[in-house]
Amino acid sequence: MFDPRRRPAYARRVPLPRVRIVHLPPSTLAALADGDLHAANATSPVPLSEGFVADSFRAVWRLRARQVVEDPAAAAWVTGAVWDEDAEIAVGRAGFHGPPDDDGMVEIGYEIDPPHRRRGYARAALATLVDRADADPAVQVVRVTIAPDNTASRDLALPYGFVHVGEQWDEEDGLELVYDRPVRRPQPRRASSPVPGDSAG
């Protein structure tokens, strides 16, 4: 779960929901890929809604279900459920496309279920993933790819330090703009000087 105190100043202006990314076991991913919500909920760590078997979600689950079979270590990185800690509901999906590559790059992906949009969940999920990347010594660069006309996602990413570095063609999504952000390691807290009378011996 992300630490709100580490959010950029821009992001701190609006209170965000408390979320965490719940990673799903291979059996849950396979059931979601098949569109079988009942089977998915039988093995999921958290209850999932109908939105998790929508077409756009299933396309991602199919990729991730194959990925974790071929590379079991990827399970700790790839897309999971965005879980609202206070409301105790799953509101969308988010995660990395996989573990860090040879250059230490990880790419973020997320989608919020339509009934839960415009409530800060996308920003909270992005902050959670950025925080995790910053804390992992294997990660050097965080990436997001955004469609040229998706100004909402661009405006979400820019305050977190993402910079446009190029473009690419995706077989499914077409032209995408590439935004990278070097990791920012958490700074150790400085020990405060003792105040007279606040400590003894």
Image (tube, rainbow, N blue to C red):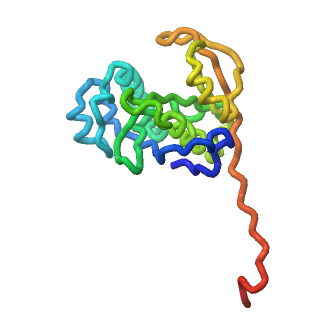
Taking 18 as reference, is 189 left or right?
right
| Residue at the image point whose x is 57% and y is 44% from the top | 132
In the displayed orientation, state which residue is furthest to the bottom.
201
69 lies above or below 190: above
Residue at image x 66%, y 24%? Answer: 179
Please state the total of marks drawn on the protein image.
Answer: 0
**Which of 104 and 80 lies nearest the eye of the viewer?**
80
Q: Position of residue 177 (x, y in %)?
A: 63, 16
On screen, residue 57 above or below 185: above
* Front-lying residue, 58 or 82: 82
Locate residue 161, reporting x and y percent.
Answer: 70, 33
In the orientation shown, which residue stands out farthest toward the left? 38
Quarter of the image with the C terminus in it: bottom right
Q: Residue furthest front?
A: 13
Residue 106: x and y in percent read 59, 32
Q: For residue 136, what is the image quadrant?
A: top right
Q: Residue at x 63, y 33 (%)?
A: 142
Q: Is residue 107 visible?
A: yes
Left or right: residue 51 versus residue 123 is: left
Query: Residue 1 versus residue 32: which sits nearer the camera?
Result: 1
Residue 78 in sight: no
For residue 201, side relative to residue 58 (left or right): right
Residue under the point 36% across and 23% down: 62
> Where's residue 192, x and y in %?
76, 70
Residue 174 lies, with reference to residue 136, above or below; the image says above
